């Protein structure tokens, strides 16, 4: 089941386009390497010749009992089944963690895109500064009127830090 999933993954797209963390990319690359190595080993083992010509060995060797014993042991050999449930659970946990992280990333990106879209819309709908009157500024920020009055009473005709920030 996991090998079918791994075979259908577009690894280059996965690591590049999703904006994953370095740890996640490293873990994915290690998994991909193990997967490809396992595929290579399985392929090499499938191509190996598995039949043994015991008659040839009986003709070559003087001690026919050894050949008979080897044939008997081979015929009695039953491959053991390995329980992969533990390894599959680890893969499923990793997959769940990766999916959760990807969903979290998608939600963050969607929220940020929404904020950027709202900001862009606000910027597009804003009137140019040359079209805004002083009365409209005072209406929007009433405290500006008090600040300007205090500055005029103190004889200040420039805004502190304006020249440093914006120049002449």
Image (cartoon, rainbow, N blue to C red):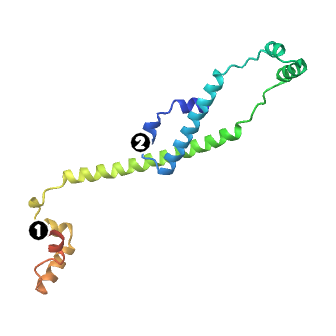
Q: Residue at x 15, y 78 (%)?
A: 148
Left or right of 154, for residue 52? right
> Quadrant location of residue 147?
bottom left
- Crowding near the residue tagged with mark 1, few <14, some 14–19, many ≥20 C-alpha atoms within 10 Å: few
x, y percentage for residue 149? 14, 81
What secondary structure is marked by label 1?
A: helix
Left or right of 64, for residue 41? left
Give the position of the C terminus as an image quadrant: bottom left
What secondary structure is marked by label 2?
A: helix
Look at mark 1 in the image and give the residue it sits on: 134
Q: Nearer the viewer, residue 107 or 151?
A: 107
Q: Which mark is residue 157?
A: none
> Quadrant location of residue 106?
top left
Look at mark 2 in the image and give the residue it sits on: 16
Q: Nearer the viewer, residue 65 or 143?
A: 65
Q: What is the count of numbered marks?
A: 2
- Crowding near the residue tagged with mark 2, few <14, some 14–19, many ≥20 C-alpha atoms within 10 Å: few
Q: Nearer the viewer, residue 21 or 30?
A: 30
Mark with earlier residue (2, 1): 2
> Quadrant location of residue 152?
bottom left
Callout 2–callout 1 Cβ contact below 8 Å = no
Give the position of the N terminus as an image quadrant: top right
Q: Residue at x 16, y 83 (%)?
A: 150
Mark 2 to mark 1 CA distance (whole Å): 50 Å
- Nearer the camera: disc 2 or disc 1: 2
**Is 56 rendered above or below residue 155?**
above
**Is 18 rendered above or below residue 48?**
below
x, y percentage for residue 21? 47, 50
x, y percentage for residue 158? 12, 78
Q: Residue at x 79, y 13 (%)?
A: 56
x, y percentage for residue 63? 89, 20
């Amino acid at each position: 089941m996991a090998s079918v999933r791994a075979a259908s993954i577009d690894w280059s797209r996965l690591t590049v386009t999703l904006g994953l963390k370095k740890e996640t990319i490293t873990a994915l690359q290690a998994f991909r390497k193990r997967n490809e190595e396992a595929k290579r080993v399985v392929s090499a083992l499938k191509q190996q010749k598995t039949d043994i010509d015991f008659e040839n060995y009986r003709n070559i060797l003087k001690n026919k009992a050894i050949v008979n014993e080897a044939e008997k042991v081979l015929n009695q050999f039953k491959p053991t089944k390995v329980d992969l449930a533990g390894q599959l659970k680890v893969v499923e946990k990793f997959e769940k963690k990766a999916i959760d992280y990807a969903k979290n990333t998608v939600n963050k990106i969607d929220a940020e895109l929404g904020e950027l879209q709202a900001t862009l819309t606000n910027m597009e709908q804003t009137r140019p500064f040359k079209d805004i009157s002083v009365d409209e500024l005072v209406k929007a920020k009433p405290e500006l009127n008090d600040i300007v009055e205090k500055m005029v009473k103190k004889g200040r005709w420039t805004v502190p830090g304006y020249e440093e920030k914006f120049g002449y």
